[in-house]
Amino acid sequence: MAKPTHPQHSPTHHDHQQCVDNALATAEQLCAQRGVQLTAIRHQVLELIWQSHKAVKAYELLDRFKPINSTAKPTTIYRALDFLMAQGLVHRVESLNAFIGCRCSNHNHEQLLLICKRCQEVEERTPEKVLTELSYELTQAGFTAHSKSIEIHGICRRCSEQAVLLPSQPN
Amino acid sequence: MAKPTHPQHSPTHHDHQQCVDNALATAEQLCAQRGVQLTAIRHQVLELIWQSHKAVKAYELLDRFKPINSTAKPTTIYRALDFLMAQGLVHRVESLNAFIGCRCSNHNHEQLLLICKRCQEVEERTPEKVLTELSYELTQAGFTAHSKSIEIHGICRRCSEQAVLLPSQPN
DNA sequence: GACCTAAATGTTATAACATAACATTTGTTC
DNA sequence: GAACAAATGTTATGTTATAACATTTAGGTC
């Protein structure tokens, strides 16, 4: 049985290089504005994270990073990730122990992560109504939020459509 | 400097034994209805989880379990947790790699977890409006959800009130 | 009760994820 | 160029979770 192709999962369904370029340019600009150092390591790690729209694990990043910097250790990666997360350039996906580039152009770091089980891509959304209702609920509960993590696992639109075209696909 | 007391965090702020009794009785009943076995190990692990309203780590459970069953291994705990989660009796708190007893009396397993940084207690809430808006948003996004994890970290009402009374308390 | 089967548990080992602690280098400021 | 802070290097270890296979237990059938 031939491995099914998933054309919609390929990087060709959009101009991914532009995603990467945008992300890196934004990161450079933000770090400059804030007077923090987007060092070579941090820049390279961010670039590796943006290789795809899939969440990537720290040790996967390490494997990808070693060809660039053969002395890299887990610490190297985790420190870069800590910096990138502190700057809001990367999100941790708690339910996957993995990391993803942040697309919040508005620097609003309250978002839903829609995690597709089929293609593994993670979509970030910031639906006002949901977040408003959530804030209201937290006020009602007397709870002061410091951070919010909303992670939804399921099947994304593209994969659902693909499933209709290829009904023999599992799940 | 004396360690500050947190009377509101003590098990005496409510009749915790009743929480435990309810949880165990419900679990027994549900498992009987479903024809699944709430074995001794599973029952004991569930009881240990309900020792508090704090999320508990698997290896903490193991330490608590060893006095009962000295041959217990990580696998023992993880297998019990897998069963309890499959039955909806326990939730995994993704952002803590920890576990908490489920209080969803209605067996609706879509909930917010409010995780207090001060007292570590986890409150479960199922606010209709938030969940409705979320469902609507997912429909809009063409995303078919299989599981939802909404975890909010911050300070709970009781701890906020306590902070007002004892303003010298850190965070 | 003997037998079968599936479920549960026991056992060993290791994989996967993450941080602590301290040494060294680099970049900035004076 | 001395002093300091930030970043990185290095070694070791802590923490979380699962794989793989053996054995025991519970429940049904004859």
Image (cartoon, coloured by chain):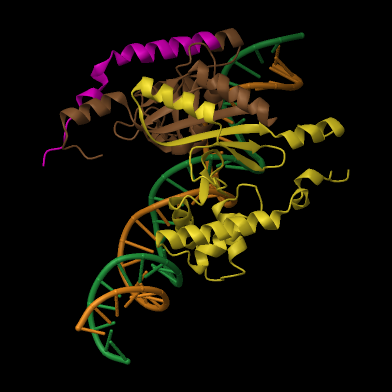
Chain colours: A brown, B yellow, C green, D orange
Residue pushed farthest right? B1
- Start-end of magenta stretch: A1-30
Q: Residue at x 61, y 47 (%)?
A: B55
Residue B61 seen in render:
no
Residue A96 colored in magenta in the image: no
Q: Percent from the top left, x then y, of residue A87?
A: 56, 19
Q: Residue at x 70, y 30 (%)?
A: A142
Residue A24 colored in magenta in the image: yes
Query: Residue B163 sits in which quadrant?
Result: top right
Establish if B24 lies above or below A168.
below
Q: Percent from the top left, x then y, of residue B150?
A: 52, 33
Quarter of the image for the N terminus of chain A: give it. top left
Towards the viewer: B123 or B115: B123
Quarter of the image for the C terminus of chain A: give it. top left
Establish if A11 lies above or below A106.
below
Magenta stretch, main secondary structure class: helix
Q: Is residue D28 left or right of residue B125?
A: left
Q: Percent from the top left, x then y, of residue A45?
A: 44, 25
How many numbered discs?
0
Query: Residue B65 sits in which quadrant?
Result: bottom right
Towards the viewer: B2 or B25: B25
Q: Residue at x 67, y 25 (%)?
A: A139
Towards the viewer: B118 or A101: B118
Q: Percent from the top left, x then y, of residue B77?
A: 50, 59
Residue B152 seen in render:
yes
Query: Residue B70 sits in which quadrant?
Result: bottom right
Residue pushed farthest left? A1
Q: Residue at x 34, y 11 (%)?
A: A18
